Amino acid sequence: MAAPVSGSHGVRGTDAGLYGPRSVTWQMHGDPVMWIAGVRALYLQALHPLAVRGVTQNSDFREDAWGRLIRTARFVATLTYGTTEAAERAGARVRGIHRRLSLTDPADGARYGVDEPDLLLWVHCAAIDSYLHVVRRSGYPLTDAQADAYVAENTEAARLVGLDPAAVPADTGELAAYFAAVRPRLAATPEAREVDAFLRRPPVHALLVPAREAIWGRFAALAYASLPSYAHALYGRPAPAPAVVTRRLRAMGRALRCIPPRVRWQLPPKHILRAMERLGPGTRPSPYKLRRNAAILDSAAGPGAARGAAGIHGGGIHGGGGGEHLPPKAGGEWRTPG
């Protein structure tokens, strides 16, 4: 069980879960732009030939794609806002499923376990990169050091799916190096194009087709546009200029953040509301807590202040920079590890 949470107004519980209310992950995963980030993660993950075959050969992806998306979102929410026991139980369930599954490489007929570390690592890194990239690019206030802290915190998520945390990128520099190493192995296979087709036009009831085009279509288009340029080249579909994508993501971020959090968080299974009930109102996720933390650390005197800027915890993690992450200059390329 996690240590008691203290020093924050309105906190009354003891089990803060894997991350806790002072983590970057706790604050960031409450942002509505995570919905778009999750779709980007699917686009990116599908470019690994073996990883995407593990999905298409072992699941009813075509018949239950919506269910798969919802289950993934619930898993992330449970790890972020659930109790330590709930998170560990969810991880054990995922590991148990993976142990029973395998895939066949059509190229040579070789069989692999779905729980191969290389495959798990790709899925993890593609997700973390997507969450971090989209949320920051949409205007969410994170310093470079807080971004490093986020990557480091989520080695816990990697552990729960069966990876050795020591072998997982623990800051944005390591994440960028990982993508540089794996990039030559990526390809837009027929399975990847199948995922692309689903994400562009997922099956819905005929009466919901207009809503799909107006709402989901815009989300999916933004998620695709936010991918790195090499992903666009592999899929064979162009995207707007990076500066245009950034403006659209910021506009979408402003629009989604106008929806009152209490309204957004009513969507099942209400993980954030349940966490606030368990730990107290002072644990409400908010980007302002990250901004306030960075401002306090930036104004503090002495060398210890710079070391403390690594995240909302106030502890130094991987020595990242402490300046605000600014949008790219007009016409400039948005830098992303993935």
Image: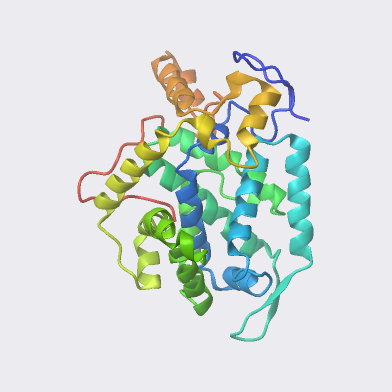
Whole-percent x, y for residue 122 in the image: 57, 60
Residue 184 or 3: which is nearer the viewer? 3
Residue at 61%, 33% in the rendered image: 272
Q: Is residue 213 visible?
A: yes
Q: Quadrant of the C terminus?
A: bottom left
Residue 51 or 181: which is nearer the viewer? 51
The colouring scheme, among rainbow, by chain, secondary structure or one colour, is rainbow
Residue 132 or 256: which is nearer the viewer? 256
For residue 2, side relative to residue 171 (left or right): right
Residue that protrudes farthest toward the front in the picture: 207
Whole-percent x, y for residue 99 in the image: 78, 64
Q: Is residue 318 visible?
A: no
Whole-percent x, y for residue 212 in the image: 44, 59
User: Compared with residue 225, is residue 61 higher up or lower down, i.e. above or below?
Assistant: below
User: Compared with residue 74, is residue 308 higher up or lower down, i.e. above or below?
Assistant: above
For residue 326, side relative to residue 81 (left or right): left
Q: Quadrant of the N terminus?
A: top right
Q: Quadrant of residue 82?
A: top right
Q: Quadrant of residue 269?
A: top right
Q: How many marks?
A: 0
Residue at 73%, 55% in the rendered image: 94
Residue that protrudes farthest toward the bottom in the picture: 108
For residue 153, side relative to residue 215 (left or right): right
Whole-percent x, y for residue 185 in the image: 50, 71
Residue at 30%, 47% in the rendered image: 248
Residue at 41%, 39% in the rendered image: 256
